[in-house]
Image (cartoon, grey):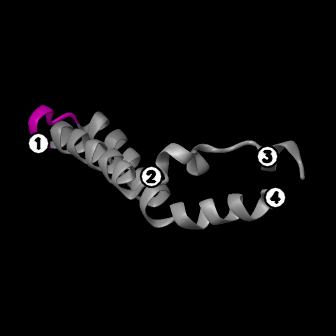
């Protein structure tokens, strides 16, 4: 196994395993995005937070289990 496979990445950190933690993270980014669009009305930060929200939904909502399974399959079994 290479060093790259041994290192935990952001998607495979044990802290993000519980669903409620990932949901809180996505919720915070969604609130921030709404704040920028509705209250500040700043387009630049609105687009930045919208991109961050899309990335969070993809990484921690849709694709998290698949990445975690890839990492766990690469680990040696004791």
| Towards the viewer: 66 or 29 | 66
User: Is residue 67 depicted above or below 34 in this figure?
Assistant: below
Q: Which residue is mark 3?
A: 6
Tell me which numbered mark, 3 or 4, is placed earlier along the sequence.
3
Q: Find residue 55 and name its label.
A: 2
The residue carrying pointer 3 sits among few (fewer than 14), some (14 to 19) or many (20 or more) residues within 10 Å by Cα, namely few
Mark 3 or mark 2: which is in front? 3
Mark 4–mark 1 CB contact (< 8 Å): no
Q: CA distance from mark 4 to mark 1?
A: 52 Å
Mark 1 or mark 3: which is in front? 3
Residue depicted at 46% across the width and 66% down the height: 62
The residue carrying pointer 1 sits among few (fewer than 14), some (14 to 19) or many (20 or more) residues within 10 Å by Cα, namely few
Q: Which residue is mark 4?
A: 78
Q: Secondary structure at mark 1?
A: helix
The residue carrying pointer 4 sits among few (fewer than 14), some (14 to 19) or many (20 or more) residues within 10 Å by Cα, namely few
Q: Is residue 67 left or right of residue 62?
A: right
Q: Secondary structure at mark 2?
A: helix
Q: CA distance from mark 3 to mark 4?
A: 15 Å
Magenta residues, start to end: 38-42
Tell me which numbered mark, 1 or 2, is placed earlier along the sequence.
1
Q: Which residue is mark 1?
A: 38
């Amino acid at each position: 196994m290479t060093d790259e496979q041994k290192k935990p990445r952001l998607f495979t950190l044990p802290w993000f395993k519980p669903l409620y933690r990932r949901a809180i993270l996505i919720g915070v980014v969604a609130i921030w995005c709404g704040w920028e669009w509705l209250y500040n009305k700043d387009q630049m930060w609105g687009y930045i937070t919208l991109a961050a929200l899309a990335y969070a939904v993809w990484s921690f909502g849709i694709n998290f289990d698949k990445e975690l399974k890839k990492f766990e399959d690469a680990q040696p079994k004791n």
